[in-house]
């Protein structure tokens, strides 16, 4: 996130691990603008929609400023996605398509969760189903770009644990799947941040490296990949 409070620290860590995939998480909702430093973004998706329609926010100009900041720091991004999946909004999708081509970013997130059955809550299942209504336009606009065959993890955001990961691995469809997750360590800075994902980040980190998870990968024939190797 080019507008993240920990941007400089993230760049430093990325340089220390050059084999790590580094993607760009474009931000147009919550936080502050890079194009207009200090200017706050809308707090909700509904407010963002109004700002895009009124011309208060120009998605391409803001997104391009964020990508330029990251590239100028020496990062060659391997993939591109958006905070709160805002590239489901047509103006943002147009901007993402233009930026991916302009900056030679080969992979773009396909944010349509194929679903995890009863493991996910009813509300998340309903939102996931609504998001899929945008799929036809999304596929048409991003024709020619590289995307995974499937995407999952959205419905488990904030509740992902070892059992949830294992259940997901059992139901993975054939092909390439992006598994979205939010691992981390819950220190004082995170406890005071606005995000609702706090203690859950540490729980996800523990679940991702659990012996049971590693065993499930083997049992179900799942191979872990990164975007750079797939691109090559």
Image (cartoon, rainbow, N blue to C red):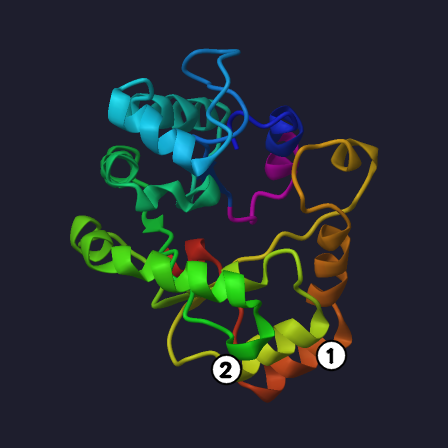
Q: What secondary structure is found at the residue carrying circle 1? A: helix
In percent of width and height, residue 199 lies at 77, 50
Mark sitting earlier along the chain (2/1):
2
Using the image, determine if residue 214 lies above or below residue 178. Answer: below
Q: Is residue 13 magenta?
A: yes
How far apart are the alpha carbons under marks 2 and 1?
Answer: 16 Å
In-image side of 125 versus 157 (left or right): left
The residue furthest right is 188
Q: Quadrant of residue 156?
A: bottom right
- Viewer-proximal residue among 228 and 83: 83
Image quarter in which the C terminus is found:
bottom left
In percent of width and height, residue 81 lies at 41, 45
Residue at which label 1 appears? 212
Question: Is residue 153 something one can see in this rendering?
Answer: no
Residue at which label 2 appears? 171
In-image side of 207 versus 142 (left or right): right
Residue at screen point 50% across, 82% down: 171
Residue at screen point 67% across, 43% down: 196
Using the image, determine if residue 64 lies above or below residue 93. Answer: above
Region rendered in magenta: 12-21
Residue at screen point 43% across, 40% down: 77
- Viewer-proximal residue among 108 and 163: 163
In percent of width and height, residue 207 lies at 72, 66
In-image side of 68 versus 193 (left or right): left
Using the image, determine if residue 23 lies above or below residue 136. Answer: above
Q: Which label lies toward us, 2 or 1?
A: 2
In percent of width and height, residue 210 lies at 75, 70
Answer yes or no: do the residues labelled 2 and 1 have beta carbons within 8 Å? no
Q: What secondary structure is found at the residue carrying circle 2? A: helix
Q: Is residue 102 magenta?
A: no
Q: Dot 1: few (<14), some (14–19), or many (≥20) neighbours within 10 Å?
A: some
Q: Quadrant of residue 128?
A: bottom left
């Amino acid at each position: 996130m080019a507008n993240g409070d920990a941007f400089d620290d993230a760049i430093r860590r990325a340089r220390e691990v050059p084999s790590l995939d580094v993607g760009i998480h474009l931000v147009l909702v919550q936080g502050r603008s890079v194009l207009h430093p200090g200017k706050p973004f809308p707090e909700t998706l509904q407010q963002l929609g109004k700002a895009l329609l009124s011309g208060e926010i120009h998605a391409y100009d803001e997104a391009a400023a964020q990508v330029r900041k990251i590239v100028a720091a020496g990062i060659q991004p391997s993939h591109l996605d958006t905070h709160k999946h805002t590239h489901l909004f047509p103006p943002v999708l147009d901007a993402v398509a233009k930026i991916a081509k302009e900056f030679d970013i080969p992979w773009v997130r396909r944010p349509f969760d194929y679903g995890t059955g009863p493991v996910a809550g009813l509300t998340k299942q309903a939102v996931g189903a609504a998001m899929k209504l945008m799929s036809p336009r999304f596929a048409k606009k991003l024709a020619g770009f590289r995307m995974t065959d499937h995407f999952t993890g959205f419905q488990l955001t904030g509740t992902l644990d070892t059992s949830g990961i294992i259940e997901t691995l059992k139901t993975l469809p054939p092909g390439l799947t992006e598994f979205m997750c939010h691992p981390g360590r819950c220190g004082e800075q995170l406890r005071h941040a606005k995000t609702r994902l706090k203690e859950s980040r540490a729980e996800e980190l523990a679940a991702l490296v659990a012996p049971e998870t590693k065993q499930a990968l083997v049992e179900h024939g799942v191979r872990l990949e990164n975007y750079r190797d797939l691109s090559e």
